[in-house]
Image (cartoon, rainbow, N blue to C red):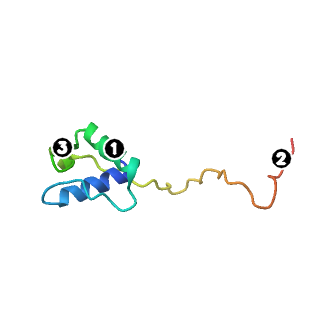
Amino acid sequence: MTLTATQAAVLDAARARPDRRLEPLPDGLKGGAARKVVDALIARGLAEPGPDGPVAGPRARSRARSRPPRTRRPGRRSPPTTRSRASGPAPSRPG
């Protein structure tokens, strides 16, 4: 099971608390985004509703790691960028 970085941060913080509550959520996570994160954790069985707010469930201990950072392999070229040029239109290629 792959978790987003936000979901992993919320679960890690909840597991470190004695009452295992998901709240307070990380700074910057508010409103609809916070609700989506909590709902996704409940849907996956990693959290469960509690009388004082959602808590980390028993499966949270054995949760999968969050996505590892993507790194370039040695000797491989980077993919072409899609950023536009600030100095005008793209050069034309001879056909």
Residue 87 picture location, percent across and down: 80, 61
Residue corresponding to mark 3: 59
- Judge whether residue 2 can be spotted in this image: yes
Secondary structure under badge 3?
Answer: helix
Which quadrant of the structure image shows residue 40?
top left
Residue 7 picture location, percent across and down: 32, 50
Secondary structure under badge 1?
Answer: loop
- Crowdedness near tag 3: few (<14), some (14–19) or many (≥20) residues, C-alpha within 10 Å: few
Q: Residue furthest right?
A: 94
Secondary structure under badge 2?
Answer: loop
Evaluate if marks 1 and 2 touch, with contact meaning CB atoms under 8 Å apart. no
The mark nearer the N terminus, 3 or 2, is 3
Question: How far apart are labels 1 and 2 at the CA level?
Answer: 42 Å
In depth, the one of 5 and 17 nearer the eye is 17
Which mark, residue 93? 2
In depth, the one of 94 and 51 nearer the eye is 51
Amino acid on which disc 1 is placed: Thr
Amino acid on which disc 2 is placed: Arg
Name the image quarter holding the N terminus.
top left
The mark nearer the N terminus, 1 or 2, is 1
Question: How far apart are labels 3 and 2 at the CA level?
Answer: 56 Å
Residue corresponding to mark 1: 2
Question: How far apart are labels 1 and 3 at the CA level?
Answer: 14 Å
Is 16 rendered above or below residue 38?
Answer: below
- Which mark is nearer the camera, 1 or 3? 3
Amino acid on which disc 3 is placed: Arg
